[in-house]
Amino acid sequence: MKIMHVDASAKRERSNSRALSRYFLERLREEGLDIEVDYLDVTVDTPPHVNEAFAIATYTPSHERTPAMKATLASSDALCKRLLDADALVFAMPMYNWSMPSAFKAFIDSITRTGLTYLFAEDGRIEGQLARQKVLFITSRGADLRVGTPYSSMDALTPALKAAFGFLGVADPAFVDAQPLQFSDEAARLEALERARTELIAVAANWAGSAKSQPASASEPNNDVMALSQE
Ligand SMILES: Cc1cc2nc3c(=O)[nH]c(=O)nc-3n(C[C@H](O)[C@H](O)[C@H](O)COP(=O)(O)O)c2cc1C
């Protein structure tokens, strides 16, 4: 199973989301899955922010693009290919100011591409191209935003991730949200991390179960889509 693993915390050794994403991959290996990991740290290799050249090139039909436009889109093309080639996507990030880290938003802006990660069907419908991939979001939050808590209505992260990836065909992503962490006492923090690890074990077992019951051909990359990108 090819997994694209993306971390987005500004913290390194002290990061909870990074630790939890590593923990998840270890659980997958423990489940006996043969995994190949394509790793991206968006705080190190941050996709460029959208600029004018990108905004114009991305909506120019591929056969009309100039060499300069193609060059502008090259790193985004490559990132899209990495996602499309993966069988599963693991995205780990902290909540920053109720939403996602800006480096992860730059990543989303880079991978949301007409003709690559989404296509227009003949009837005008959007066809997201990441429908094949299993997707897990691991988020870490300082406060407790679970349903029923005073901050629950402030969660702009979960809906933003669901919308951005739903558009790309991800219908039923798994979410493991570790909360409350930074803004809680030691006991609540430890309990939140333990709850997250328990949930990650369940997701790993679920992925392992479906991987073992899937025919090998199901993990072939969608070459038609990549052919489109090379027009
Ligand atoms: C700049 C910044 C903004 C943050 N904003 C929020 C927030 O809006 N809500 C929240 O619950 N926690 C917030 N936090 C706390 C982090 O989400 C929390 O510490 C999380 O565990 C960090 O994950 P990490 O350990 O992977 O870096 C913020 C932290 C930082 C550094």
Image: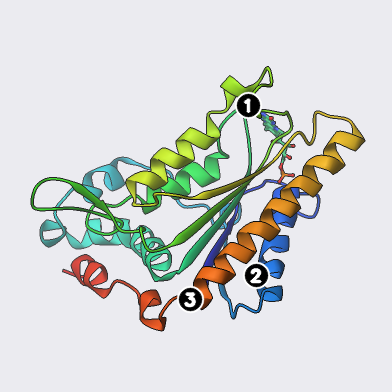
Give me the C-alpha separation between circle 3 and circle 1.
34 Å
Sort mark 2 into few (<14), some (14-19) or many (20+) by Cα contacts within 10 Å: many
Q: Position of residue 79 (x, y in %)?
A: 41, 62
Mark 1 is on which residue type? Val
The residue indicated by pointer 2 is 28
Q: Nearer the viewer, residue 23 or 228?
A: 23
* Residue pictured at 61% horizontal, 77% vertical: 33
Secondary structure beneath dot 2 equals helix
Q: Quadrant of ligand 1?
A: top right
* Residue pictured at 63% horizontal, 65% vertical: 205
Residue 38 horizontal side relative to residue 151, left or right:
left
Q: Position of residue 72 (x, y in %)?
A: 31, 56
Q: Position of residue 177 (x, y in %)?
A: 65, 42
Eyeballing the image, is 44 above or below 85? above
Give the farthest residue toward the right. 186
Mark 2 is on which residue type? Leu
Mark 3 is on which residue type? Ser
Q: Are marks 2 and 3 in contact (CB under 8 Å)?
A: no
Eyeballing the image, is 96 above or below 12? above
Q: Quadrant of the C terminus?
A: bottom left
The residue indicated by pointer 3 is 213
Eyeballing the image, is 153 above or below 42? above
Q: Nearer the viewer, residue 171 or 158?
A: 171
Mark with earlier residue (2, 3): 2
The residue indicated by pointer 1 is 147
Residue 38 appearing in the image: no
* Residue pictured at 23% horizontal, 66% vertical: 229
Mark with earlier residue (2, 1): 2
